[in-house]
Every structure is written in structure tokens, then in C-alpha cells.
Amino acid sequence: MPHWYKEFCKDIKKNKLPYDVRFIGVYHYKGVIVFVDFLKDTYLKKIVHNSSAHIYINDLFQALTNGVFHKEDMYGNHIYAIRGNKFASYLCGKEIGQSILFSLFEQFNQGFTFGQWLKVLPTIKEMEKANWPEWRQTEWPGWYLEYKFNRFTIDNSTSPHIIYTGQSNKGKQAGAFDFDIWFKKAQFYGDLKASDITATEAPGNDQTAFIECINMFGKFWYVIYEHETKKDSEATDYKEVRAYNRYMKKDELSYAKRLKTGVKFMKMTILELNRINFREALSEFNQGHQPDGSARNPKFMIKKKDIDRFVVFRYNYQR
């Protein structure tokens, strides 16, 4: 995006000319055309240069699949990708690229505890009081996320579109996929993930089950909620760790260096993976062996540095 674009827009505004300036990219291949509207309001607030407007293959694919696709990139820029036969409707404001699924996640995010420090003991007590079956789990931030999401789906009757399926493994029926979300009307699965915001990777799922699922339903959503993390330092003599373990009737220093004593959720992203792109987004993770010496099934890991190529929805908490 050359520097003169910014000056041109300033002149239009300064002289109060009746023009609507848009930055439109045109992508075509063998007669297939996708237009991309790089919304100028976000780009013009920054220093423009010749590599400042990015579009990915998945964004073009979303436009071809859905007609109009909107996303916010990792820098806060807003982008619309539009299939050629929808461009006129888009310019007239008749096509906005909104999805009922994205609307439901927006609604959940508005009521979720973004930007608040959650302490381990009050949080697990909240889950215990609600009879959440996984309240005893040591990796409590992810289970708290699932607890709140499950409550949201019940309270808002989302079952025509979103069903929470992430019950404990004991309740799984033989042959059922062990994922958290079933998008009923759209007919595909997804999984909720809570991850430390500083981590470069997030744990994925069993490789065999994931590949079987994506081959059966065509696509898969990873819904990743990232949090800042606190752990007890030795200077406090593990005060919060000890309180937690006393409540759980465990050794006072159990999991002492690894227990998250506080988390603050700050952002979320939804990644859409399909049969073609999932190997670019995921890496292999060998879990080692079971206590009896047998090998654990290998899992995938989600490579965070690459996720902007696969993002279909993003939410950032405004401090």
C-alpha cells in the first residue's frame, strides 16, 4: 500500500469531496474472482508500506465458500473477502459476512471473564458448587472455560447451532469423537483450548481421531482462549498452592511449581482447519509412555506463530 494512498485519502477528507475511497484487491484464477476490501479506517491509522496489507489463501477460500467473509487480522486490521458474484451486493450493504456461529461466540465473549484475574481456589469452589464434574482437575483454567461455555449453551438454548459435548471420557459412548463442540446445523466438530498467552504452541488432539474426524466432516474449528498466568513464587512459600492442596486434601506441595494460581483471559481466536491445510497449522507431538511403559497415542500441537493464516474469527479484550 504505497504512501500516496494515505495522502490521497487525507486530501479527499480535507476538501470534503463526495467520494468513498476503498482499497480493493483483485484475486483471480481461471475465471474465478475474489475481491478483497482492506478497510482503510484501520490501515490509515498506521504507517503504510508496500507489504502492509496481507491476505491468505484461507481468506480467499472462505470467500468462495461463504460468499462474503470478514476477519480481523493480528494487527487489528479489518478485511472483507468477497466472491465475485457477491461484490455488488456487498458494496450496497446487503452482504456483511456475518455468521450465526460468530454471533454466538461474540455473545459468549461479552459475558465471559476477560480481563479479570481468576484465582485458583475461588474458581474451583465455584465449579464444585455448580456440580461441574471436572472441578478437581489440576489444569483448572481449561475446565473452567468449558464449565462457563457449557452453562452458556444451556442458558441461551444454542442447541440448533452449538452443542457442548465435552463431557468427561467416562461418559463417552463407544466410537464417539472426544471433542468439546458439535456445530449441529453446520455439521462439524470443534474443540475448546485454554492456553498461556506466552506459549508458542497449544496442545491439540489425538492424531488418529482428529484425522478421522476431519476426513468425515470436512473441517474442524479450534477455539483458543489465551490467558496471562500467575504461579506461586518460592518467596511466598507457596501460600496459594498450599491452600489449594489443603482444600483438595493433597500433599501441601503437590504440583507446586506447575500449578497456575491465577489466570487472566485476554483474547480468543477460532481457527478453521480442513483436509488440505491442517498439516500446515499443526505439528506432531509425541507424548511419551504410559506409567506401564506402553506408548501413548501421538497428539498434534497447534503452532501459534502460523495461526493468522487460518483464523476465521478473533476477539481481543480491550484493556
Image (cartoon, rainbow, N blue to C red):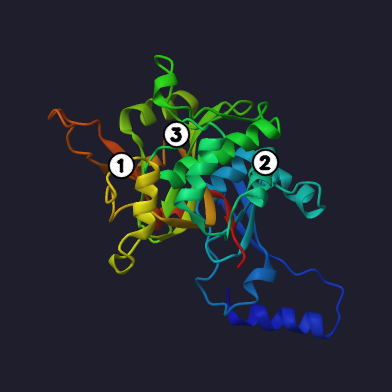
Task: Name the residue furthest top.
Answer: 174
Which label is found at residue 104? 2
Identify which residue is drawn at 14% across, 28% down: 292
Identify which residue is drawn at 51% across, 49% down: 122
Q: Name the residue nearer the viewer: 136 or 153.
A: 136
Image depth: mark 1 or mark 3 in front:
1
Identify which residue is drawn at 40% across, 25% down: 169
Check disc 1 and report its element: helix, strand or loop: loop
Image depth: mark 2 or mark 1 in front:
1
Check disc 2 and report its element: helix, strand or loop: helix
Amino acid on which the number 2 mark rests in the picture: Leu
Q: Position of residue 57 (x, y in %)?
A: 49, 50
Q: Position of residue 196 (x, y in %)?
A: 41, 55
Amino acid on which the number 3 mark rests in the picture: Glu
Q: Name the residue nearer the viewer: 94 or 303.
A: 303
Does residue 210 appear left or right of residue 311 in this picture?
left
Q: Quadrant of the C terminus?
A: bottom right
Q: How many neighbours does mark 1 have within 10 angstroms: few (below 14), some (14-19), or many (20 or more)?
A: few
Amino acid on which the number 1 mark rests in the picture: Lys
Does residue 259 appear left or right of residue 114 in this picture?
left
Which label is found at residue 134? 3
What distance separates the C-alpha of mark 1 from that of mark 3?
Answer: 17 Å
Q: Quadrant of the N terminus?
A: bottom right
Considering only vertical position in the picture, is 198 above or below 51? above
- Disc 1 marks which residue? 250
Identify which residue is drawn at 28% across, 56% down: 257
Q: How many neighbours does mark 3 have within 10 angstroms: few (below 14), some (14-19), or many (20 or more)?
A: some
Contact between labelled residues 1 and 2, with CB atoms less than 8 Å apart? no
What distance separates the C-alpha of mark 2 from that of mark 1?
Answer: 39 Å
Check disc 3 and report its element: helix, strand or loop: loop
